Image (spheres, rainbow, N blue to C red):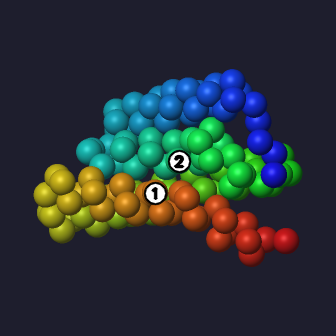
């Protein structure tokens, strides 16, 4: 386990929030309501894990970066799929955002671990 210093974790937290916001802003120019939220949230979860919960980050740098990228991509794919499904079913704004948030978080939090657990 590689636990960075507090000021490094704070910088990662702020940069993660800025990156997530920037990506969500870009997606919001081309996609409707739940998709920018799903993309921003999926990017924020693995980055914020480094800052808030560093003991879950793999010790090897390459493995940690791969874990974060795969987790973010899993969150984006699952979040956008659930967002599209809830829009197609016309469940309403609160249900759409709630289900999208739950699916995105679970996929981003556990997706990287599950996928990379199968890769040697």
Where's residue 56, x and y in %?
A: 68, 55
Across and down, in percent, residue 81 comes to 39, 63
Q: Which mark is residue 2?
A: none
In the picture, measured across the screen, residue 65 lies left or right of residue 71, that is right
Judge by depth and name the residue closer to the eye, 26 or 115: 115
Image check: 113 left or right of 41?
Answer: right
Instruction: Look at the image and tell me in which quarter the C terminus lies.
Output: bottom right
Total labels drawn: 2
Give the residue number, with chain letter if any, for mark 2.
45
Residue 83: percent from left, percent from top: 32, 58
- Picture layout, residue 109 above or below residue 65: below
Q: Nearer the viewer, residue 58 or 85?
A: 58
Q: Is residue 76 left or right of residue 116?
A: left
**Residue at disc 2, secondary structure:** helix
23 and 29: which is toward the camera: 23
Seen at 76% across and 36% down, the residue is 4
Answer left or right for 45 relative to 95: right
Q: Are marks 2 and 1 in contact (CB under 8 Å)?
A: yes
Q: Which residue is label 1 attached to?
A: 105
Dot placed on the residue nearer the N-terminal end, 2 or 1: 2
> Considering depth in this image, is 96 or 30 the residue closer to the camera?
96
Residue at 28% across, 66% down: 85
Please provide percent x and percent y for residue 22.
Answer: 47, 29
Residue at 34%, 58% in the rendered image: 100
Separation (CA) of disc 2 from disc 1: 7 Å
Q: Quadrant of residue 95?
A: bottom left
Q: Is residue 3 above or below residue 76?
A: above
At label 1, counting other C-alpha atoms closer than 10 Å, the crowd grade (few under 14, some 14-19, many 20 or more) is many
Task: Tell me the residue at 30%/49% (across/down).
Answer: 34
In the picture shown, does residue 26 fall above or below 84? above
């Amino acid at each position: 386990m590689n636990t960075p210093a507090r000021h490094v974790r704070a910088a990662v937290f702020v940069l993660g929030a800025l990156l997530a916001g920037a990506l969500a802003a870009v997606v919001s120019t081309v996609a409707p309501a739940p998709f920018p939220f799903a993309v921003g949230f999926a990017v924020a979860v693995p980055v914020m894990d480094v800052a808030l919960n560093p003991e879950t980050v793999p010790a090897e740098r390459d493995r940690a970066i791969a874990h974060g990228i795969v987790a973010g991509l899993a969150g984006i794919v699952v979040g956008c799929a659930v967002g599209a499904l809830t829009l197609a079913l016309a469940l309403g704004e609160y249900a759409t955002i709630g289900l999208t948030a739950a699916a995105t978080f679970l996929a981003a939090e556990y997706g990287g671990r599950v996928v990379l657990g199968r890769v040697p």
